[in-house]
Image (spheres, helix red, strand yellow):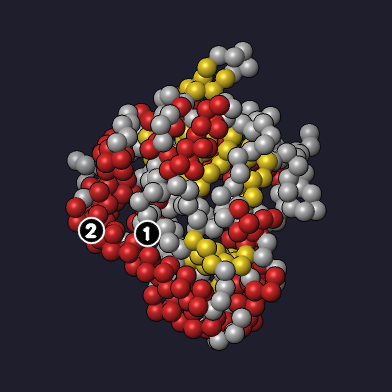
Amino acid sequence: MVVTVNENFNLIQNNYLFVEIARRVDEYQKENPDVDLIKMGIGDVTRPLAKSVIKAFHDAVDEMGDPETFRGYGPEQGYDFLIEDIIENDYKPLGIDLRNSEVFISDGAKCDTGNFQELFSQDNVIAVTDPVYPVYVDSNVMAGRSGKAGDDGFYEKIVYLPATAENNFVPALPQEDVDIIYLCYPNNPTGTTLTHEQLKEWVDYAKENDAIILFDAAYEAFIRTSDVPHSIYEIEGAKEVAVEFKSYSKVAGFTGTRCAYCVVPEELKINDSNGNKVGLTALWNRRQSTKFNGVSYPVQRTAQAIYTPEGKKEIKENLDYYVENAKLIRESLIDMGLDVYGGENSPYIWFKTPDGIDSWSFFNLLLNDAHVVSTPGVGFGPSGEGYIRLTAFNTYENTKKAMERIKQLNL
Ligand code: MLT
């Protein structure tokens, strides 16, 4: 017997992007221990958990220490108390009705968006906007849907839909036959958005072409403009074609606490090989029941606290804080004469490197000369070459300092 590897892993092009950045930053920091680096690379929050959220966390931990209130395995799909608050607060105000059975609590949108492809057959064609959150591509490479990557960085079987300054970051609808489309709006990494009308084109396309949209709305809480939809289900008919992913990571500082959810509507059905319709809600439920034992009780209670009046107020203060940072970054970079995108309905600011410098060289320049950690645009896909992403998640003081340091580079 010889154990053999899943050869698809050999097709993955690089280290996971943020692992590679962390490796380079660690190396730099070891060689330069006295340098005070400002980290604006991975979108990791810096504000601590809100007071009412922490109280709920403590209370739930106490419940776990009392034989009267202790809880063992919870429902794999999540507790109804949290699901009901999600439906009531995140969807009802938008005019969207959901059943409890359509909402699945998880430990992160990264896991959900990475795992969801398991429900589809291997020969399905996936389409991604480019640049893109690398999890969508890498998870499909691991699953054998990508083929090989060419020298240009594009996988042969994946359909790429470029989103660049040339098309104002509104990717064109696919020209070829695609089955599964990953969309993320407000977009990671470009920070750009789609209007209701623009998103409707995607929903209509999916309906007309029997495709499915996996809609990542992890940054929805940063929307400040009225014509940007907060949920894909605001678009008529979207329940028949879309799964939506949401996360508490950036909304409530849960990057270390881990809680998220996805919505899989009962209306969403795909075909089996005999042409029978199969509901994705039941399939995802089956997948989760087998591979996941749910998010811990204290964490779900903690997430629930976000929906209390006090919680809502505190969360809004934190979000507003990051929105101010985003504004500062955006305006500072514009003042430096750079071409800047995003940062208005998003914690991400995306800008063109000056003089056509490639992304990694500019990443190195910012690291070495400004002591600022960024994310190279090309790490998100070939169309990200020549761009850099900064996040608004550091402290206001550090954000200000970072902008001063970048300004001194006289770009
Ligand atoms: C990012 O920086 O793109 C995100 O923080 C990554 C993630 O949410 O996994």
Residue at screen point 39% across, 79% down: 397
Split into 4 quadrants, where in the image is the C terminus? bottom right
* Front residue (pair 146, 128): 128
Split into 4 quadrants, where in the image is the N terminus? top right
Left or right: residue 8 versus residue 189 is right
Mark 1 is surrounded, within 10 Å at the Cα level, by few (under 14), some (14 to 19) or many (20 or more) other residues, namely many
In the image, residue 100 sits, relative to residue 319, either above or below, namely: above
* Front residue (pair 302, 210): 210
Secondary structure of the residue carrying tag 2 is helix
Residues under labels 1 and 2: Cα distance? 14 Å
In the image, residue 401 sits, relative to residue 114, either above or below, namely: below
Q: Which mark is residue 18?
A: none
Which of pointers 1 and 2 lies earlier in the amino acid sequence? 1
Q: Which residue is mark 2?
A: 313
Q: Amino acid at mark 2?
A: Lys
Q: How many marks?
A: 2
Residue 21 seen: no
Quadrant housing residue 328 = bottom left
Rendering coords of residue 129 (x, y %): 60, 47
Q: Which residue is mark 1?
A: 253
Residue at screen point 38% across, 30% down: 102
Rendering coords of residue 258 (x, y %): 41, 51
Residue 161 seen: yes
In the image, residue 138 sits, relative to residue 117, either above or below, namely: below
| Pointer 1 residue Cβ closer than 8 Å to ligand 1 | no
Mark 2 is surrounded, within 10 Å at the Cα level, by few (under 14), some (14 to 19) or many (20 or more) other residues, namely some
Q: Amino acid at mark 1?
A: Gly
Rendering coords of residue 85 (x, y %): 26, 41
